Image: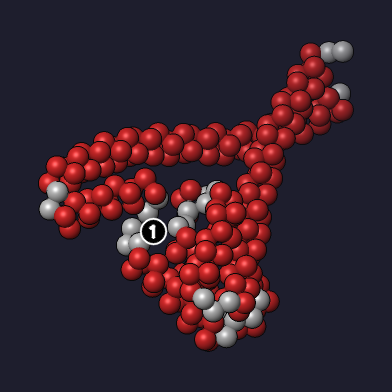
Amino acid sequence: MNATLLTTIGLLILGYVFAAGYLYWAFSAIQRRRRIEKAKIMFGRAVASVIRGTRELDDQIAQLERHYETRASILNANKSRSKSFDRALWTLIEEFDTQENGAFAKRYGSLTIEDRNRLYAIVVGLERRRPFAKLSPRWANRLQDIATSLENGDAALGRRSVDELFVELTLYEETREKIEKERDRKHTAFQWAGISATIIAGIIGVALTIVYAN
């Protein structure tokens, strides 16, 4: 077996490895998007069912929160587009308002204008009951402590809560920057893998042409 053929085989193997890695990454990304989309549809259908099924506000909120908690980890798999409970509900209202009713009904189940308005009332009620609900519990609890200290005139609690919030926000920002840099690095690496696979495939084609021509 001559050196040219060995080189061709090596390049062919290397090309397959790069191509397989790139395809695996692309397939994983597609599957993740499909899981998020399926969870979104299931949550929307559950919301429609609850709104149609009961008129008691507290019972509606309890059921809706349970449905959200069941699917929250999937709905928020894409961290850059993560949604709080009330934001997830508001997204459904926006879709109802902007899509043709037939399209919304096909996707989530039928809702009347009255149902839509009840869902809107729930979102508004949540914002009034829990003004920091759109934030994660970590930030919401700190801000609630600060609000409570202001209401009660407790300067010591307020100061302590502000100091703790500052430390947590600092750590959060540092962690977020590291994650973004790592994500960008991996994205760049996969892009180069795809380019390299294309180049290697071209080299292999030329090499095979030379081998068989001889």
Q: Quadrant of the C terminus?
A: top right
Q: Amino acid at mark 1?
A: Lys
Q: In this rendering, is residue 163 above or below 140?
A: above
Residue 121 shows in this picture:
yes
Which residue is depicted at the point 43% across and 39% down?
Answer: 180
- Residue 41 locus on image (x, y percent): 63, 65
Q: Quadrant of the N terminus?
A: top right
Q: Is residue 160 left or right of residue 180?
A: left
Q: In this rendering, is residue 214 above or below 149?
A: above
Residue 3: image quadrant is top right
**Considering depth in this image, is 199 or 102 the residue closer to the camera?**
102
Which residue is depicted at the point 47% across and 82% down?
Answer: 117
Q: Is residue 4 left or right of residue 67?
A: right
Q: Residues within 10 Å of mark 1 (few under 14, many from 20)?
A: some
SS of the residue under disc 1: loop
Which residue is depicted at the point 48% across and 74% down?
Answer: 57
In the rendered image, which residue does mark 1 sit on?
A: 134
**Considering depth in this image, is 118 or 176 the residue closer to the camera?**
118
Which residue is depicted at the point 33% across and 49% down?
Answer: 141
Total labels drawn: 1
Q: Is residue 184 left or right of residue 175?
A: right
